[in-house]
Amino acid sequence: MDDNSREDQFITDGSIRVNSGLVAMARVHGPWLLLFAACAAVVIMRRPDVILNPQFWAEDGKIWFANAHNLGAWHSLFLPQNGYLQTVSRLVAGIATLVPMRWAPLTFNLAAVAVQVLPVLLLNGGRGRALVPSVGARLVLSVLYIAQPYTTEVHANLTNAQWHLAVSAALVCCFDDWKSGRQVATDIVLVALFCVSGPFCILLLPCVAWLAYRRRDRRAMWLLALILSGACIQLALAVPQMGVSRAVAPLGATWQGFLRIAGGQVVLAGLIGDAWRHVYLLPPWREGIALPFIAATLGAAVLWRAWRLGNDGAIGFIVFTLFVFIAALLSPQLSTTAQWVIWEVPHAGERYSFLPILGFYAALMCVAAYDRSLVSRALAIGMLGCVVLVALPASWKIRAFGDFAYRQHVEAYAEAGPGDVVRIPINPAGWFMELRKPMDAQESMH
């Protein structure tokens, strides 16, 4: 064989190996990419301006990006906000300072979408399949999560991505033992980021402690130690800030208010989505107590049945969401007036309903799958059907953010002189972020 023939054979063999590698990668990663793309498409379709007209939301611009821009990404990374660390948000803000400023909101939104989709990927992975063996059950749970009604406040914005990150961390803590080094690294990194990205690790701690007691395996013990460390860090930062970083307002707590919040903002909001505001307007709801009592009792009954029927993972997740709801009741941040009175109103404090509604759905799934009573199972299946047929369509479309002409303000920033502070309006209305033009920076705005 001459040199040219050898060279042709070498190129051919190399091409075959490359093609075989690409085929193998497509077989392994293709389904995950398709699942991610499908879930991301659902998130974006519900509010297309996430991609078509990206803008900052609240702390995304006012705190995370402004701090990273004005103070530097590294220095701002370790700053607590409202008494606790927010590492994921600050990491993304640091990355956003590396791209042209006009694309910074899109960077935030893409990161928020990725965090929002992550629980579906975890649920449908190998250990997720072990946790929920039924393909049908995983499909229903995935749809209920990714298309969850009543989620305007936590949809595709990085400020509230900590709520979705909490779902991922809770799922990871419910998985079985490690079988590879990759699983160890993935779980440790994800849970560690969760622990330093909000206060939810404090509420997840007792649930993981219970799982560790029940399972008594090394994985549960390691995760318990990690979450305990995170909880100590967050508490050490939060306790000195109590009454300083959070607005102080009267709670306005009453039994009637509790029933209206639990029955309306969790049970009915979960069952019929945005349509629950029509129930709120009914005089029997606003002036009486019978309807709120029935709705709250229905939710409590479902949780009780799930407590008796669910496996350790399901119970741990449901109890975690219950702790989140209790913590929100004890210290909501909604108004400078009576907090519970405001929370009774539809769409007020939606973020506080997000995890409790997921816990309610998980409880319904437990009853529908495991309850021996045909009546209970039929009722649970009927309520899940109501979610799919009523709540999801009624809540599918999420209102776009107000257009504050962000790119025009980027142009104004580009024309500002060194050291000038430019004030840029962001969502929600009345919020601003202030960016200081560096003295010596040659920044790309476009």
Image (tube, rainbow, N blue to C red):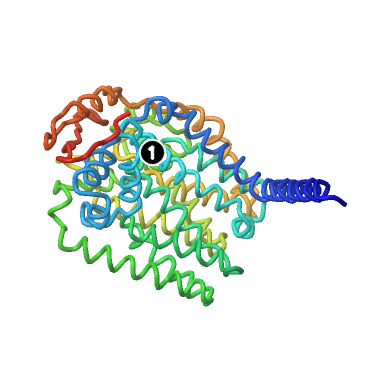
Residue 402 position (above or below residue 241): above
| Element type where label 1 sits in the image | helix
> Residue placed at 16% from the left, 31% from the top?
423
The x, y position of residue 385, in whole percent, is 58, 36
Residue 189 seen in this snapshot: yes
Label 1 crowd (10 A; few <14 / some 14-19 / many >=20): many
Identity of the residue furthest to the front in this view: 2
The x, y position of residue 122, in whole percent, is 55, 53
Residue 228 placement: quadrant: bottom left
Q: Nearer the viewer, residue 133 or 284?
A: 133
> Residue placed at 36% from the left, 33% from the top?
103
The x, y position of residue 106, in whole percent, is 38, 34
Q: Is residue 435 left or right of residue 293?
A: left
The x, y position of residue 63, in whole percent, is 23, 44
Residue at which label 1 appears: 107
Type of the residue with mark 1: Thr
Which quarter of the image is occupied by the C terminus? top left
Q: Nearer the viewer, residue 67 or 388?
A: 67
> Total of numbered circles in the picture?
1
Q: Nearer the viewer, residue 418 or 362?
A: 418
Q: Is residue 315 left or right of residue 77?
A: right
Residue 113 placement: quadrant: top left
> Residue placed at 22% from the left, 52% from the top?
81
Residue 290 seen in this snapshot: no
Q: Is residue 239 left or right of residue 120?
A: left
